[in-house]
Amino acid sequence: MPNHIVTAFDDELKELGRNVAEVGGLAEQMVDRSISALMRVDIDSAEDVIRDDRRIDDLQREIEEKAILLIARRQPMARDLREIVAAIRIAGDLERVGDLAKNIAKRVIALQGQFQPPKLLHGVEHLAELGLEQLKNVLDAYARRDVQQALGVWNRDEELDALYTSLFRELLTYMMEDPRNIGFCTHLLFCAKNIERIGDHATNIAETVHYQITGITLTEERPKNDRSSTASIDLPQTDD
Amino acid sequence: MPNHIVTAFDDELKELGRNVAEVGGLAEQMVDRSISALMRVDIDSAEDVIRDDRRIDDLQREIEEKAILLIARRQPMARDLREIVAAIRIAGDLERVGDLAKNIAKRVIALQGQFQPPKLLHGVEHLAELGLEQLKNVLDAYARRDVQQALGVWNRDEELDALYTSLFRELLTYMMEDPRNIGFCTHLLFCAKNIERIGDHATNIAETVHYQITGITLTEERPKNDRSSTASIDLPQTDD
């Protein structure tokens, strides 16, 4: 194959990677802003996040189409094919992260003017910081093609799940203490669940980065601090 | 191109379609069994569903790999390419449906031995019936390549969202009435949310079937009975 064709293909691959990084940046920004909006009950900011979700959906669709055309035209093998498949998968996870940030933003709008004891927000903020860090780190691992950093994210999901479990309990306690907290806490429970799921998508991306670089699918069950089978009523689920 | 090659390709496409239908059947069965398990708090059945999730994950991965190799080898155009892309997307949605059924099953295990007033379950059962019907109908639309049936599912998601909204309110009322209901109702709220999300995936599949047959992406916003912006505290979110 003449060299200039290989080079053109390399350029196309690089562009695809840049597109994925762009979606990653947008997803990260949406999560960050949805959490700030939640902490300050900032409606304008929440509406910005909701608007951005449309953009992320479009970008994901473009990446998918571009990737599929690339496979059809270039018939890539091995690492090149994995690179393209990884772009499709990661864009899919990032699109879901955008949805989850939008869900948080929509709850901010639902919360306005309600009874909101600030202490109830602390735990959610802390959970969100860890979730956002996981997302940042895995995007960094993707950008640098760093399998060790990806594995670091993969292993750390357990910590996020444990934090979610304890926050779930805490919010349930507030609900039992004072029925006026029930509505607000229920919204916060769903926000917390959205953050925990953002962490799951960061873990999925870590698996994809690992596969992209090594060609090996991580089949071992991801470490989960899932204590659902010990089964007290106030234990939450670490859903998938 | 010699005829026998076209035929072989047709066979490959048909096989891919059968694989997707198989995953669809499994997903439907998992949802059905997770709901029965929830209604009867049947741990064995819940554990079966949790086990099946592994199978659905594997099948989805196989479809994705097979589809990508098919694109690379056959360089299909137009309708054939859409057929393959649709298989990838639908398998992805079905894998998520499997996750959601598993989440419900995990909550069944967490619920055992707890205070469970049966009346609290009626609304969830009703919601589940509609969700399952949407899933069955869209899989049928896929099998029959029936764009009208797919549009029917797409339009009916609104009804599921409205039902979820009223169930959310009902469960919140039970929580306020009697704090002993808080734990159980919180689990049911998450189960209801999982069912509502199964409905969203049925809607995604309807969009994919529409695209596969017509080549047109449904860009119009899906009808949503989303009343989040009217924003009383006891209004739930119809998340994406």
Image: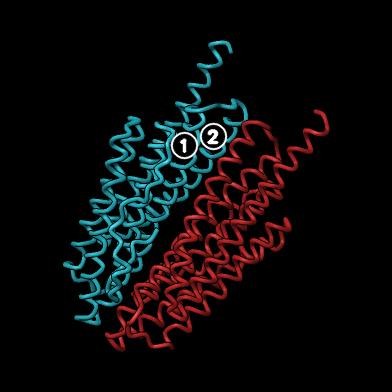
Chain colours: A cyan, B red
Q: Chain of mark 2?
A: A
Q: Position of residue B209 (x, y in %)?
A: 65, 54
Q: In x, y percent, where is residue B60? A: 54, 50
Image marks 2 and 1: residues in contact by CB distance under 8 Å: yes
Residue closest to the far top: A2
Q: Is residue A113 visible?
A: no
Badge 2 element: helix
Neighbours of disc 1 within 10 Å: few (<14), some (14-19), many (20+): many
Identify residue for label 2.
A67
Placement of the C terminus of chain A among the 4 image quadrants:
bottom left
Q: Considering only vertical position in the picture, is B63 above or below A74?
A: below
The amino acid on which the numbered mark 2 sits, given as a three-letter code, is: Ala
Q: Which residue is mark 1?
A: A87
Count of numbered circles on the image: 2
Q: Nearer the viewer, residue B110 or A184?
A: B110
Please state which of residues A94 and B9 is positioned toward the viewer in this rendering. Answer: B9
Q: Earlier in the sequence, mark 2 or mark 1?
A: 2
**Residue A177 against residue B217 in the figure, above or below:** below
State the residue in front, A115 or B74: B74
Residue B88: give x, y in percent of width and height: 58, 46
Marks 2 and 1, how far apart in space?
Answer: 7 Å
- Could you say which is closer to the camera, residue A4 or residue B128? B128
